[in-house]
Amino acid sequence: MRSSNPVFSRRGFSRDNGHAGFNASPQAGAPAAGANPYAQGTAPNPYATNPYAQQDTRYGAPQAPPRSGVMTIDDVVTRTALTLGTVVLGAAAAWALLPVDEANLGKSYGIAIGAAIIAFVLSLVQSFKRKPVPALIISYAAFEGVFLGVISSAVSTYIGPGVVMQAVMGTMCVFAGVLLAYKMRWIRVTRRFYGFVMAAAMGFMLLMMVNLLFAVFGGGDGLGFRSGGLGILFGVIGIILGACFLALDFKQVEDGIAYGAPREESWLAAFGLTMTLVWIYLEMLRLLSILSGDD
């Protein structure tokens, strides 16, 4: 299964040196790590020679060799915490050093837009690399944090001081809720689920790009997709899409661990989870800003 990220569809774990990774992940509920549920007819099984695949130890069958140098959930948690921590530090620094008062608003916004562009370019470069580059991922997180810090400070100043904390808490609740639903198997990630989510995300982003173009060249709020009733509707849709991407991210992490992806590729999991959480936070912040403005 390819990327679950709302922006890039190429991101995925590699399959090198006998390690099967995310680009060849099974559907939810696959019967065994050595089976390929996507194979058609008598196509060869790409996991048959995977030395890290789980082997049946019943009736004297040989036991799998020790899994050294492969990704674990601890690796994913550690690197995700490091990446998200960099985002938080960048946001805190931007909030403190780039005020959004009338005297500095233009300068702060300019730096925020520049940081967002740099973050986008860095994430694009990483998405097309076969292997993760920790320096790229951390740099992306730092610049993304600067952008989020300025935007959050502006919302706190001009919309309401409690909106940012509400958005943070809302993002955490979405993460916890999706994780619980995934662990309880209330959400089952299948190829149909993946295809539906990616199609919905592409349509959503296309509409937002058209709205942005109308806003830039026509003034105002473009087609009105980000204000009023339509803004609330599209904000909810954006959050739901982010929740779906979290489920896809969890599936990729689960498959990477099951198939023995190299430990270094836990950086890809951290990268994807960070991008998805940033997506959810921005949609939550936008939605709460609209609701607060309507009070």
Image (cartoon, rainbow, N blue to C red):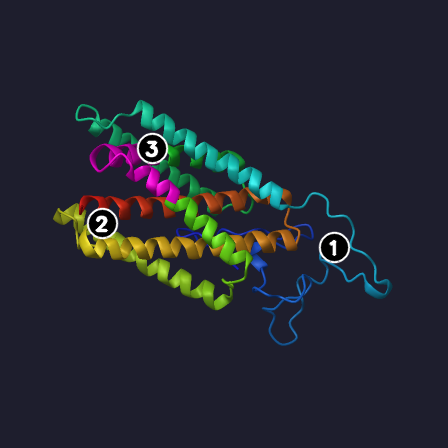
Residue at point 66% right, 51% down?
A: 260
Distance in Å between CA atoms under marks 1 and 3: 46 Å
178 part of magenta stretch? no
Magenta stretch: dominant secondary structure: helix
**Residue 37 position in % (x across, y down):** 61, 69
Q: Is residue 271 visible?
A: yes
Q: Amino acid at mark 1?
A: Pro
The residue furthest bottom is 41
Q: Which quarter of the picture shows residue 20?
A: bottom right
Does 166 lie within the magenta span? yes
Residue position for label 2: 212
Residue drawn at the location 30% of the way across and 35% of the way down: 152
For this rendering, which residue is in front, 22 or 57?
A: 57
C-alpha span from label 3 to label 2: 22 Å
The magenta region covers: 148-169
SS of the residue under disc 2: helix
Classify mark 1: helix, strand or loop. loop
Q: Which residue is mark 1?
A: 51
Q: Residues within 10 Å of mark 2 (few under 14, many from 20)?
A: some
Give the residue number, with chain letter if any, for mark 3.
149
